[in-house]
C-alpha cells in the first residue's frame, strides 16, 4: 500500500522525466545531428514537446489537474508512433501519403540495444506516459 501511494505521489514527476528524455533525444538527433524528421515524427514532436513543458510545471506544482490535457497529447503521439511502426510491415499503408519519406524512414538512424528504433521508443514513451497519468484521474 505504501509503495502505491509513493508511486502515485511521484507519477507526474516520472511522466515528466520520460517526456523530457524524449524531448532531449528528439532535439539532439534532429537539430544537432541534423537528421530531418519525417511527417509522422513531426506529429509525435507536436505531442511530445508540450508534454515536456506541461508535465514539468505540473510535477513542480504537484498538480494532477494537467492530466485531462496531457492524456490526449500522449494518446495522439502513441497513435502516430504505432502507425509508423505498423507502416513498415504493411507496405500498402506507405501509399497513404502520411509519411512521404519512404526509404529514408525505413533506414534506421538510431537503435537502442540493436532492437529499439525511434518509432518503437516513441511509442513506448507515449504509452508509459499514458500509463503513469491514468491512475491520477481518480486522484483529482
Image (cartoon, helix red, strand yellow):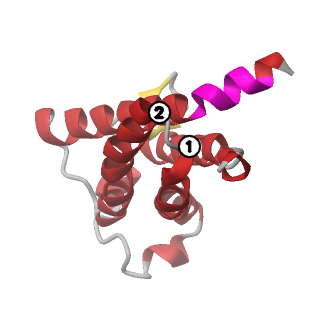
Measuring 29% from the left and 40% from the top, which residue is drawn there? 26
Measuring 52% from the left and 52% from the top, which residue is drawn there? 65
Which residue is label 2 attached to? Answer: 18
Q: Is residue 7 magenta?
A: yes
| SS label for mark 1 | helix
Tell me which segment is drawn in magenta: 4-11
Relative to 21, residue 45 above or below: below
The percent coordinates of residue 75 (x first, y second) are 55, 60
In the current view of this chain or complex, which residue is farthest to the bottom?
Answer: 96
Relative to 113, residue 140 above or below: below
Measuring 22% from the left and 38% from the top, which residue is drawn there? 27
Which residue is label 1 attached to? Answer: 129
The percent coordinates of residue 16 (x first, y second) are 44, 35
122 relative position to 138: left or right: left
Q: Are marks 1 and 2 in contact (CB under 8 Å)?
A: yes
Work out how far the residue at label 1 is from the one at label 2, CA to CA, in angstroms: 7 Å
Relative to 7, residue 80 above or below: below
Q: Is residue 121 visible?
A: yes
Closer to the chain start, of discs 1 and 2, is 2
Specify few, some or many for label 2: CA neighbours under 10 Å numbering under 14, 14-19, or 20 or more. Answer: many
Q: What predominant SS class does the magenta segment belong to?
A: helix
Count all numbered tags in the image, as a single digit: 2
Front residue of 45 and 120: 45
Measuring 43% from the left and 40% from the top, which residue is drawn there? 58
27 relative position to 10: left or right: left
Front residue of 41 and 102: 41
Residue 116, label in figure? none
The percent coordinates of residue 70 (x first, y second) are 48, 55
Specify few, some or many for label 1: CA neighbours under 10 Å numbering under 14, 14-19, or 20 or more. Answer: many
| SS label for mark 2 | helix
Front residue of 139 and 104: 139
Amino acid at each position: 500500500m505504501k509503495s502505491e501511494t509513493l508511486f502515485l505521489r511521484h507519477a507526474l514527476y516520472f511522466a515528466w522525466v520520460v517526456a523530457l528524455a524524449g524531448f532531449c533525444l528528439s532535439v539532439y538527433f534532429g537539430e544537432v545531428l541534423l537528421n530531418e524528421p519525417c511527417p509522422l515524427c513531426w506529429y509525435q514532436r507536436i505531442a511530445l514537446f508540450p508534454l515536456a513543458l506541461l508535465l514539468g510545471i505540473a510535477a513542480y506544482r504537484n498538480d494532477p489537474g494537467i492530466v485531462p490535457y496531457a492524456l490526449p497529447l500522449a494518446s495522439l503521439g502513441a497513435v502516430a508512433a504505432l502507425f509508423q511502426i505498423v507502416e513498415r510491415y504493411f507496405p500498402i499503408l506507405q501509399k497513404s501519403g502520411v509519411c512521404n519519406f519512404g526509404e529514408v524512414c525505413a533506414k534506421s538512424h538510431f537503435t537502442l540495444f540493436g532492437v529499439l528504433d525511434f518509432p518503437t521508443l516513441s511509442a513506448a514513451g507515449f504509452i508509459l506516459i499514458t500509463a503513469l497519468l491514468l491512475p491520477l484521474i481518480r486522484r483529482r
